[in-house]
Amino acid sequence: MQNNSMGVFLLFIVVLLLSPLAEASETAKDNYRTYCMQCHGMQGTGMGLNIRDMSVQPRDHTDAKAMGGRTDDEIFKVIKEGGFAISKSVLMPPWGDVFTDDEINDLVKYLRDLCKCKFGG
Amino acid sequence: MNYRIVFLAFCTFALGCMALTTSAIAGDGANILSERCASCHDLTGPAPTTLEKIWQRKAPDLFYAGDKYEQAWVEAWLQNPKRIRPAGMFYMDHIKPGEKRDMVDDSTLTDHIKLSKADASAVAEALAAKQPMNSLIDAEKHDPAVSPGPLGEMMFDKFFGCMACHQIEPGYGGLSGPEVYTAGSRLKPEYMLSYIRNPQAWDPKIWMPNKHVPDVSIQKMVNYMVDLSKEDWNAKQ
């Protein structure tokens, strides 16, 4: 019985030690730099490296009017599930396999800083 | 009788020489890899699991090169290397703000070293032996009969948006990912199937999203890329 308790305790310690590795979270700034700037641009203005031949241009994240027209939930959904999920362009891909939900929530806050806006203004 | 013994001895000697030559070529390839390639390419793995590590990557990982590349393509390309990623390995290291959009900063890009035919052959052989991810390859079954038809380009553009980051012909398409018009000759079909199905299974932090493409569409996309690679792009440029 004592051996079993010790086993469970050791397992708990191992899980604790391993969990930060499995859930290594990146900052919103670093995620934005790595995954978003290729299309939304180094300044977040939608003037990214890839846009020349795109049929639909990426959103300007500094545009307070356009970004203010989206709720935080909509922005979360479009990052996680892609443009198609909110009836926008498929050129905005789903990032749900790359970001954790926490990382997406951090990105929503980061975007609100970029546009200096919130939903409704 | 004596002639038979001499003949047998000669055959044994010849076979021995062939075996030695083959292993010497592979051995040379491994030496060249460690001496000339390892400063930029990761030959041992695993793939980066943090952004900091993936930003430091200077060139494609080669530790699973045998799972990924067509050996004949590697041998030919190493003798006449041409840039495959228009904006280098990590695009953020090679772009600058432009008037209408961010632009590739060519001054930051360097050319790949060129190898002799013998060295290229030895390296290609050594790379072909690197297959640590073959369980992912074995899980795929390429069906060359699934024709993309006229929808190939539509799939890359309108349906799945791949063209946002990849060029489907020289000078047409996105720049942050590798060109796909040569992918069909460069990459094994099973690798393309597996990578489109789940890019993060190969490279956990890569900036290519998993678009959850249905299997039949993945087959069509791969066959579209195989068709694209049959074009003589050099003649068209």
Image (spheres, rainbow, N blue to C red):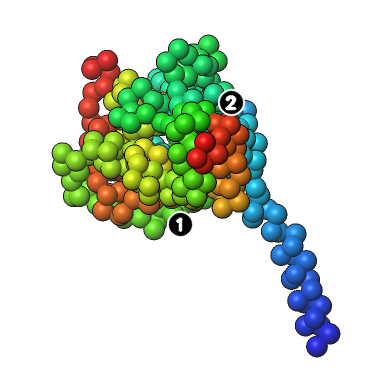
Q: State which chain disc 1 sits on.
A: B
Q: Is residue A26 visible?
A: yes
Q: Is residue B58 left or right of residue B135?
A: right
Q: Residue at x 30, y 29 (%)?
A: A55
Query: Relative to B116, is B66 above or below?
Result: below
Between B31 and B198, the one lying in front of the other is: B198
Residue B88, given in percent of the width and then of the height, sits at: 50, 24
Q: Residue at x 43, y 50 (%)?
A: A81
Q: Mark 1: which secondary structure?
A: helix
Query: Relative to A73, is B69 above or below?
Result: above
Residue B141, given in percent of the width and then of the height, sits at: 31, 55
The first of marks 2 and 1 along the sequence is 2
**What kind of residue is marked 2?**
Arg
Residue beneath disc 1: B135
Q: How many marks?
A: 2
Residue beneath disc 2: B36
Q: Quadrant of residue B53?
A: top right
Between B206 and B144, the one lying in front of the other is: B206
Q: Nearer the viewer, mark 2 or mark 1?
A: 1
Query: Which residue sits furthest left?
Result: B150
* Alpha carbon distance from label 2 to label 1: 29 Å
